[in-house]
Image: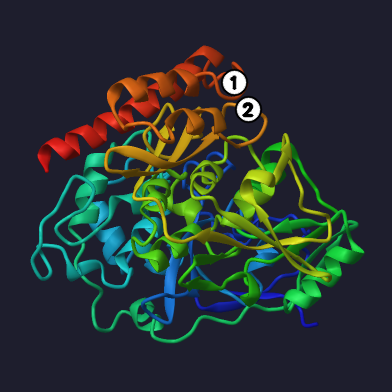
């Protein structure tokens, strides 16, 4: 196996002297590329943002912004990375840098390189200018500019001194890439194929297997292995809790875990597809997930985070499980013994524990079809975006001739595991979808789970929000019926 290498700003650089847990941010800064900063070390501030060439959906390659503080540098073996220094120079600024400069988008400058990279990813997004009024007509809203710029691209970047208006102004002033823009032209060629990788240092090992069969063999031989995809959870453990897993297996680029299919009876979502990829591939075909995605952390996190990772950590406050529980989803687990399907409602066994065995991988998530016609995802948190849930509720109901024919409710943040609100479902099914029924069911919903008090919310607040959530859903449907 050859020495791991990364192409950074056009130059191929060997990965020597690194540990299995070394982050991309630390490696870049050790090489003198200090534009990327460490602000939070947990993927919440975006000061460490860099661009990575990833397989595209609308073009062969897409420039994707990721948190360099979370991604192990070994996971980028064979890949192409561009930092803020690689976008432009002081004598030849990139259009993103130019607009930020002339519109006062930077003061102390600490966060600016991260904004530059996140903004550049959106600048190069295929089709960005096709709907904006500045490029082909169309209208804008408070989250999209006349040039088609989506402000959610910056939802993972924080600024403490400049203020967001000049940054937004710079984003909305961007035109389309010039004809001679090298990074734009790069999108027409495929990205580098994932490299098989093995890094051994200080008694720890990082391995990227060539295929699923090899990955399953590694897990069978190393039951203690830490499985990593986007590293959005593992990276936090490394940075803030000093985790040093002795054996890490990277599965994010395994083709067998990146399959996508919409069939007659189910939607098949590969466990290693990123949430951004899933959102774009689904293209609105699962409305409940469309409500989930913008509330799931930030674009920077969704560019790396996977459903497999979110379910693998088994966190009781993960955002995906409540939505997937409401959709009656199944988890496809795979090992050398073959595949097995487990209903998500039976998957969680306790706090951060599941039925998945040490030698098994989450291969995919299956969402059965047809879907319920009334769906919603409610997240109660201290911030509108880029925050951790205090309570999350997923809804999937069928109301036929004014009567609830089917109800599935998934809850997060109110017990040691995500769970189905079975008592509330029973209180709804077979009854009219009216305010009296909903108020009775809301009272039941407020008693579901065993919520606790912590720094995010009290137990009584969590219970109250459960009941209010159902009332909110009914009020929405009543307004829609009145308008219709």
**Which residue does the image show at 23% across and 57% down from the upper left?**
99
* Residue 95: percent from left, percent from top: 26, 65
Q: Marks 2/1: CA distance?
A: 5 Å
User: In the displayed structure, does residue 354 sit left or right of residue 185?
Assistant: right
User: In the displayed structure, does residue 338 sit left or right of residue 456?
Assistant: right
- Is the residue 231 above or below the residue 155 in the image? below
* Residue 165: percent from left, percent from top: 22, 41
User: In the displayed structure, does residue 231 sit left or right of residue 178?
Assistant: right
Residue at the spot of label 2: 415
Secondary structure at numbered mark 2 = loop
The residue lying toward the viewer, choosing from 459 and 8, is 459
Mark 2 Cα-neighbour bin, 10 Å: few <14, some 14–19, many ≥20:
some
Residue 451: image tag = 1
- Is the residue 332 above or below the residue 110 in the image? below
Q: Quadrant of residue 87?
A: bottom left
Mark 2 and mark 1 in contact? Answer it, CB < 8 Å: yes
* Residue 362: percent from left, percent from top: 68, 60
Secondary structure at numbered mark 1 = loop
**Which residue does the image show at 53% across and 67% down from the upper left?**
268
- Which quarter of the figure is the N terminus placed in? bottom right
**Which residue does the image show at 44% across and 35% down from the upper left?**
429
């Amino acid at each position: 196996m050859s020495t791991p290498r990364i192409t950074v700003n056009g130059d191929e650089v060997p990965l020597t002297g690194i540990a299995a847990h070394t982050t991309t941010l630390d490696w870049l800064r050790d090489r003198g590329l200090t534009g990327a900063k460490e602000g939070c070390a947990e993927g919440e501030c975006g000061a460490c943002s860099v661009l990575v060439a990833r397989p595209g959906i609308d073009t062969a390659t897409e420039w994707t912004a990721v948190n360099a503080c979370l991604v192990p540098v070994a996971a980028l073996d064979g890949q192409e990375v561009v930092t803020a220094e690689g976008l432009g120079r002081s004598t030849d600024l990139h259009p993103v840098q130019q607009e930020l400069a002339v519109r006062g988008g930077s003061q102390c400058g600490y966060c600016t390189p991260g904004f530059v990279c996140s903004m550049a990813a959106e600048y190069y997004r295929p089709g960005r200018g096709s709907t904006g009024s500045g490029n082909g007509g169309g209208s804008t809203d408070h989250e999209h500019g006349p040039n088609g710029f989506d402000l959610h691209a910056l939802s993972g970047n924080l600024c403490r001194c400049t203020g967001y208006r000049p940054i937004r102004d710079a984003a909305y002033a961007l035109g389309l890439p010039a004809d001679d823009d090298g990074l734009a032209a790069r999108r027409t060629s495929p990205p580098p194929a994932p490299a098989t990788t093995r890094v051994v240092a200080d008694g720890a090992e990082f391995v990227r297997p060539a295929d699923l069969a090899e990955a399953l063999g590694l897990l069978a031989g190393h039951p203690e292995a830490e499985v990593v995809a986007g590293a959005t959870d593992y990276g936090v453990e490394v940075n803030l809790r000093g985790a040093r897993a002795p054996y890490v297996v990277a599965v994010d680029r395994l083709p067998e875990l990146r399959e996508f299919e919409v069939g007659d009876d189910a939607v098949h979502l590969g466990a290693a597809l990123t949430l951004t990829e899933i959102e774009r591939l689904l293209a609105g075909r699962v409305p409940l997930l469309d409500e989930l995605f913008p509330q799931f952390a930030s674009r920077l996190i969704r560019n790396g985070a996977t459903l497999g990772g979110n379910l693998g950590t088994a966190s009781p406050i993960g955002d995906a499980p409540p939505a997937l529980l409401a959709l009656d989803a199944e988890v496809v687990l795979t090992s050398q013994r073959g595949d097995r399907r487990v209903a998500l409602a039976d998957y969680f066994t306790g706090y951060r524990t599941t039925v998945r065995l040490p030698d098994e991988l989450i291969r995919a998530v299956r969402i059965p079809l047809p879907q319920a016609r009334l769906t919603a995802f409610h997240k109660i948190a201290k911030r509108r975006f880029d925050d951790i849930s205090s309570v999350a509720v997923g809804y999937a109901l069928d109301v036929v001739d004014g009567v609830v024919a089917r109800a599935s409710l998934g809850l997060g943040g109110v017990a040691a595991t995500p769970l189905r609100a079975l008592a509330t479902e029973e209180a709804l099914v077979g009854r009219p979808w009216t305010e009296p029924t909903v108020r009775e069911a809301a009272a039941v919903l407020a008693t579901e789970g065993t919520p606790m008090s912590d720094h995010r919310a009290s137990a009584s607040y969590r219970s109250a929000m459960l009941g209010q959530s159902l009332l909110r859903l009914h009020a929405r449907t009543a307004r829609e019926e009145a308008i219709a």
